[in-house]
Every structure is written in C-alpha cells, then in structure tokens.
Image (cartoon, rainbow, N blue to C red):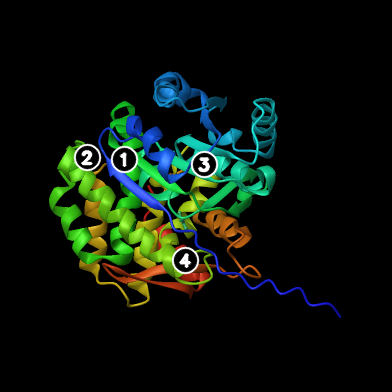
Amino acid sequence: MIQVNLKKVVDDTYSIDIGKGNSPKLPSLLKKLVPAFRYIIITDSNVAKLYGKTFLFHFEKEKLNASLVSFRAGEENKTRETKAELENKILQHSAGKDSVIIALGGGVVGDVAGFVASTLFRGIPFVQVPTTLLAQVDSSNGGKTAVDHPLGKNLIGAYHQPKHICIDTDFLKTLSQEEYVNGIAEIIKQALIQDEKFFLFLEKEMEKLVNRDEKILKTTIEWNCKLKASIIEKDEREIGPRKILNFGHTIGHAIETLSQYKLRHGYAVSVGMVAESLIAKELGWLKENDVQRIENILKRVKLPTRLPKSISPITILKKMQLDKKSKEGKIKYSLIDKVGHCEFNVGVENEIALRCMRGIME
Ligand code: GLY
C-alpha cells in the first residue's frame, strides 16, 4: 500500500482595510500585497455602469494590466452558466496562473467571482471590493463562495479566502436606503450573537447609522468585521461555532426562498430573528424584555418584524426541513440565550416553531 502523506498547514491570513476613499488607493496597495501579471475585475452590469471605468482607470494610472468582465446583475444570474460565461471571457483575455481576480460589487458578485477564482487554473488569488453594506459587513468576509441551483441557494461552491478586502464607504453613497438597510439587519445580528456592548452602541447610535454618518459607519463596519473575523478564525468550515452566524437565518432563509427573492436577504432575516427570538423565549432562554429590544431596534430601522401574509408558517416549516442544513429532516437552529450570546445546533419541537411563527403573522 502506498501512503501519500499530505498533512497540510495552510496560512490563509488576509487583511481588511476599512475607510472612505480606499478603492482609488487599492492598485498601489496590491502591487505589494497581491502582485500579479494581470488583474481581472469581475463585476455586474449595475456596478459596471456606476464604477467600472473609474475603477479600471486607477489600475491604469499605476501601470497595471487590468481588464473588466461583467455579467447581468441579479440573484437569478448567480448560476453555473454565468460562471462558465465569465471563465470564457477571462480566458479570452489571456489570463494565466499569474492573474488575480478582483470582485467589485455586492454579495452576488463576490460569491460568483470568488468561486471562479477558486477553480480557474485550479485556484488563483482573489480580492474582495464589496460595494454594498451587506457585502461589506458579511458576505465578503469568510471565504464562502458559491452559485445557486434551481433546487436551492449556494448549493455549488467552495471555501476560498480572499487575499484582501478593500472596504470603501464611498461606494455606499449610491445605495438605495432599502439596500443600505438590508446590510443593517446583518449588523444587528452580529451584535446579538456575539457582543452586548456592540448592541448597546447600535441602540444608542442607530439614527446616525441609518443616516450614514461617516464616523459611526466606519466604527460599526470595523466592529462588525472584527467580530465576524473572530468566528472565522475559530471555524472556517462551519463545523461548529461559525453556525452562530445563522441566527435568524433558519426561518429567514426559508422566507427569502419562498418570496422568490422578492424579499431582500436582510429583510427576511429580520423576520427570522424575531421568530427565532420568540422560540428562544419559549425555551426559557430569552426574557420578554430582550425580545422587545430586538423588535424595537429592527422597527427603528424600518425592517419588518412580521411574517408576510403570502407565506404561511407550515410552508416555512416544510422549506426548512428541505434545507441543506437540516439533517434527516430535523431542523437545527442557532438561538441566542441573551443579547450577545448564541448557541448552535439547537433542536426545537416543530409545534413550538409553528406557534412562534403564527404569533407574528401580519
Ligand atoms: N454569512 C454567514 C457566513 O459567512 O458564515
């Protein structure tokens, strides 16, 4: 018998730079941090229109080889077909193993571009330049990359960590308030699962955050990214503790899918957090006062706290049973037992979940 000894020590350390006006400075930083013969910028049709030319110009100014390839914007285009199209375009640009991919856009762009980078030439480096608040505080950080399948979201993908994340708050200026608030839902979640002090800060400063106050925004993104990074460092592959990031997502994800993605991710997670907080209260984990605090902060941001009429608790339950995170139809939840702490792999009687969902019907 031949033994192939392949024990690995991997260093996937990456940096996150947060600040106003960071993206024009990125090309000169990349020369040192992630040198490449060619940079392939992947973006979508919306972001290409807004920022494509300017972003490319910063690379040209630094005399770096750079090309931009784009695909049609929207979750419905986060597919294997889009990935193949992008790969064709990239290969036509004579990219090689010495290329680096830059993901310029929101969560869909980051997920697709990261997945392309994970398989092209058996894996090349990539850099995240998230342009939405949701991508800045959540999806760009942690190396999850994927495309969707008609049977579900993110079913085909890989863990591929970025070499660097460039967060430029200037990108947020062109976001609609609805899209901006979409990101705030994940920030509230991050505080609820890990850090009561962060939650108190959000309770105090929420109006300023909603109004995009630069100082509060930077502190919030930084605080959030540090908290999330501390989880990734412990459990990159979501074997255990990373599951706490799914608080509000077991029910929220089902709502998002059943709405056929008409309800934005953060909005669905907002309802999910209320329903799952009520479950935690029924289990005797969470006090009524804490459930109220959670509902109040979501309402202040104008995030929904009630189930849309069109989606019934029983269809949500069935959807959750089919989710890839369920094992043999048994739904596992990540539930907070106080503001700032979360438990994962919690089994809950379906009757309790149904009762809590029925309690928040519109
Ligand atoms: N968005 C959840 C995670 O990164 O695990």
SS at circle 3 = loop
- Residue 276, placed above or below residue 206: below
Q: What residue type is labelled 3?
A: Ser
Picture disc at residue 243: 4
| Earlier sequence position, callout 4 versus callout 2 | 2
Neighbour tally class for label 4: few under 14, some 14-19, many 20 plus, Cα within 10 Å: many
- The residues bearing labels 4 and 2 have C-alpha atoms spaced at a distance of 28 Å
Q: Is residue 273 visible?
A: yes
| Earlier sequence position, callout 3 versus callout 2 | 2
Circle 1 is placed at which residue position?
181
Neighbour tally class for label 2: few under 14, some 14-19, many 20 plus, Cα within 10 Å: some
Q: What residue type is labelled 2?
A: Val
Q: Name the spot of residue 345 as percent of width and height, x first.
A: 49, 73
Neighbour tally class for label 3: few under 14, some 14-19, many 20 plus, Cα within 10 Å: some
**Which image quadrant for residue 319?**
bottom right
Of residues 362 and 104, the one drawn nearer to the viewer in this rendering: 104
Neighbour tally class for label 1: few under 14, some 14-19, many 20 plus, Cα within 10 Å: many
Q: What residue type is labelled 1?
A: Val
Look at discs 1 and 3 and give the one toward the viewer. Answer: 1
Of residues 119 and 216, the one drawn nearer to the viewer in this rendering: 119
Label 1 close to label 2 by CB (< 8 Å): yes
